Amino acid sequence: MTFAALLGLAGLALVDSTSFGTLVLPLLMLVQPQVRAGRVLLYLATITAFYWALGFALLLGAQRLVLVWSDLDDSRALDWVQLVVGVGLLVGSFWPDTPWGRARARARAAETASGVPKGWRGKVLGPEARPATVIGVALGAGLVEAASMLPYLGAIGLISTSELSPTGRVLALTGYVVLMGVPALGLLWVRLALHDRVEARLRALASRLTRHTGTALWWVIGILGFLLATDAVRRLGLWGS
C-alpha cells in the first residue's frame, strides 16, 4: 500500500472519529459533573472492538460478496428492491424538516446544553451507568451508524483491494479503528487534566457536533437514496433508455 493510500486511510479514520458514536456520546459522558474515566474507556474500547470485528468480517467476505453481487446483477427483482430502498431513504432524509423532527432536535439540543442528560441518557451516560449498559450503548451506536458511515465503508474497500497480505490488512484495519478513538481519548485526557475549567467548552463542542453530525447524516442518507433510486430507474428502463 502506497504512502498516499495510507494517508487517505488516516484521513478517513479522522472523519469517522467525529461521528455521533465515536465522539459525541463520549463527549456527553465527559461533560457530567462527575466523570468516570473507566466508563469512558470501556465505551471507547467496545465501539472500537465492534468496528474492528465488523471490518474483519467485511474483509473476509468481500470477495464472496463480489461474486454474489455479480450473480444478482441482472435480476430485475433486485432492481425493484433497490428502487424501493432508495426512495425510502430519500423520503426519510426529510425527517429533520418535519415538525416532529424539529421538535426532537430542539429537545436534544436543550438536553445537551444543560450538561445533565435526562431520561435514558442520564442512565446510560451518567456516572452511575452500569458497565453492561455502557457496553450495550456502544454496540447500539455502532449498529445504528455502521451502514451510514461511508468513510468507514470506503476504507474497508481500500484495504480489501490493496496488495497487502492478510496480516497486513488486519494491521491496517487495527490502526484505522484505533485512530477513530484517538480524538475522544485526547478529550478525556484534557477533561481529567483540566477538570471543570474545560467543562463548558466541551459542552459547547458536544452541542455543535450534535447538530453537525445529525445534519450530515441525513444529507448522506438522502444522497445515498437518490443515487440508489436513480440507478434502479435506469436499470429498469423506467426513464429514458
Image (cartoon, grey):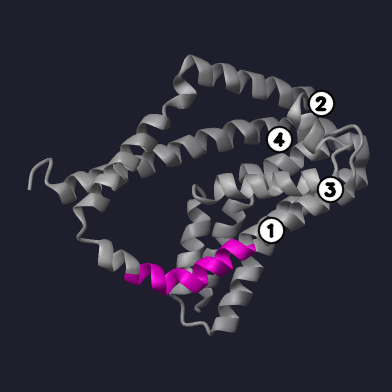
Whether 177 is among the magenta residues is no
> Is the residue 145 above or below the residue 48 in the image?
above
Measured in 3D between alpha carbons, the distance from the residue under mark 2 to the one under mark 4, in whole angstroms, is 15 Å
**In this rendering, position of residue 4 left or right of residue 74:** right
- Specify the amino acid type for callout 1: Thr
Dot 4 or dot 3, earlier in sequence: 3
Which residue of the protein is positioned furthest toward the front in this rendering?
77
Eye-nearest disc, 4 or 1: 1
Dot 4 or dot 1, earlier in sequence: 1
Measured in 3D between alpha carbons, the distance from the residue under mark 4 to the one under mark 1, in whole angstroms, is 22 Å
Is residue 4 among the parts visible in the rendering?
A: no
Is residue 95 among the parts visible in the rendering?
A: yes
Q: Circle 1 sits on which residue? A: 48
Measured in 3D between alpha carbons, the distance from the residue under mark 2 to the one under mark 3, in whole angstroms, is 19 Å
> Is the residue 163 above or below the residue 23 in the image?
below
Residue 135 location (% of width, % of height): 76, 49
Measured in 3D between alpha carbons, the distance from the residue under mark 4 to the one under mark 3, in whole angstroms, is 26 Å
Q: In the rendered structure, which segment of residues is drawn in magenta?
A: 52-67
- Near-viewer residue (76 or 214): 76
Residue 162 location (% of width, % of height): 46, 77
